[in-house]
Amino acid sequence: MDGAIDENCDEKVKIINRECEYDVSKKLICSKVPYFRNMFNSGLKESKQNVVKLDFNEIAFDSFINWILSDFLTIKMDMVIFLNEMADYLMMRGYISSYCHEFFHCNFNADYLPDVLPQVTKVSKLIKSETVDNFICRYFLLIANTNSFLKYPVEAVEAILKLDLMIYSEYQIFESIMKWVNHKKDSRLQTLPHLLSYVRWCFIDSVDLSKIKDNEYIKNLLNFGSIISSSGESKFDRSNQKFFITFIDIIDGEIPKVRIHLYNDKMYSLPIGDFTQNDDISLEFVYGDRTSDILFDSGTKGIRIDWINHTFRWLDSEFLISTYYGDIGRLIIKFQINLSEFSCFLDENATELPNPISNEYLLLESNGKIILIGKTRREKKLFGIFPVLNHEWFQGFRKRKHSFHATVLDNVVYILTKDLEFIEFNYETRSYNKSEPFKYDCAFEFDSVYLTSHQTKDDMIILVDKTSEIGRIHVYCTKRSKWTYNYADISNDEFDFTAFTAAFLSLKNIKPAFGHKFFPTQ
């Protein structure tokens, strides 16, 4: 062909990428890049004119040209996705794409969200925009408590606030906006009216609205009323994404399955269906827009669910659960705002514990923070860290047999000990209460129960006896400080009850079984 490469001639080819021009050896670039080799062997006009026009991100393409000339590839988070897309277009999926994939998943964290958001699309191959959005939505409350969030440019904050974030109330959106504005109020105060438009005001209750109106900045906003009215009627209530969920082992051939049910706040059940175990599901922390990671048994076990393919993978081995917490620490916790962390014994005196050392501890998500409940190594006394900011606790988490169950609701930690003592500890007021509600009426053992709750906006602590034939549920009403008994058909003689826990879930990919509709309040 007329444009065939002459191996004995090393002529130059001019590459024009947006505003930049490069004169590169045709022989060299064709030896390394299949796209150019095919082009110059095709007889196309570019092969005759030795001029190629491209439209790639300038930083990514400049790094690519440097690699062509020096075999040295520079990858940075602000262009890694652009570079991967370019490599795919230039038919170099195997080499450069593999480095991009490894770099992204080894280095991505909350600090880099402003770099990643402008790069991702619905079809980007390294990671799709829906996957990044899924990560942001699930962990927004933790991300909003990081120094990283306070440094985000307004464009990144806007991109985040428009998502269907998993929150307990729209007041939390308002709080995150005010934290961001206050961090540099002289330059950011002017953005406040616009950012307030991302609050879905029709879902704000009267108590929260009254608190907002008492804010000093809001009092000085002359157009606050118009901001509320102009937001209109939002179709989706972001605070309505909290559920209880059960997993029941199903005996159906050789392949393990679980049957999943959701429960709303009134404990009405909604069957979702049977899911098949698939240990080929990726373990990358930031993975997929149709998956959910759910922890249970006081955060010592977990499951990753693919809602579209009806498959799951357990996260219950020591390696997998420790890796999960290690990722949380690396991606988010290490950037958390330096709040007033304190540690103390969980007793009547709440004595300060300056240097806690423990092999037995739980990490509990608490409405935008992570708290730690453990036992001291020698005295075996219960203690807490509120909140835990040292990400080394996450890196060092190990799955062990625990001598207590724990959950947290608002500012109160609820603990069930191996002796079936029930402890309440308010980590704000440092008040303590211990009781023995099951001393004379107990048909279960410590190892056969789950203790769980939502993190806020609720008044129930749930204790489930997983060995009961009919799935006995004990409910502690925090407002009345009283236990009651409810019964739910969450198990039977044929199947083994596996877990009951609270979880944030996006319903967009979850389809109920048997044509059921979601709860009326959903």
Image (cartoon, helix red, strand yellow):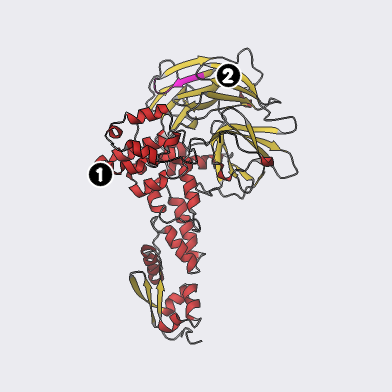
Task: Give the distance between the C-alpha atoms of the residues marked 2 and 1, in whole angstroms.
Answer: 55 Å
The percent position of residue 260, horizontal first and vertical second, equals: 64, 37
Would residue 305 appear left or right of 207 to someone viewing this image?
A: right
Amino acid type at circle 1 is Ser
Which residue is pictured at 66% across the width and 18% down the height?
443
The extreme left residue here reads: 186
Which residue is pictured at 49% across the width and 48% down the height?
286
Q: Nearer the viewer, residue 234 or 123?
A: 234
In the rendered image, which quarter is residue 335 located in?
top left
Q: Nearer the viewer, residue 364 or 214?
A: 214
Q: Residues within 10 Å of mark 2 (few under 14, many from 20)?
A: some
The percent position of residue 380, horizontal first and vertical second, equals: 49, 22
Amino acid type at circle 2 is Leu
Q: What numbered label is drawn on residue 187?
A: 1
Secondary structure at badge 2 equals loop
Secondary structure at badge 1 equals helix
Which residue is pictured at 50% across the width and 77% down the height?
38
Q: Nearer the viewer, mark 2 or mark 1?
A: 1
Please tell me whether residue 427 belongs to the stretch shown in magenta: yes
Q: What numbered label is drawn on residue 7?
A: none
Q: Which residue has dot 2 on it? A: 420
In the rendered image, which quarter is residue 82 located in?
bottom left
| Contact between labelled residues 1 and 2, with CB atoms less than 8 Å apart | no
Q: Nearer the viewer, residue 214 or 423?
A: 214
State whether residue 136 appears in this view.
yes
6 vs 237: above or below: below
Please tell me whether residue 280 belongs to the stretch shown in magenta: no
On the rendered image, what quadrant is the C terminus found in? top right
Q: Residues within 10 Å of mark 1 (few under 14, many from 20)?
A: few
For the record, the magenta segment spans 423-429
The extreme top residue here reads: 440
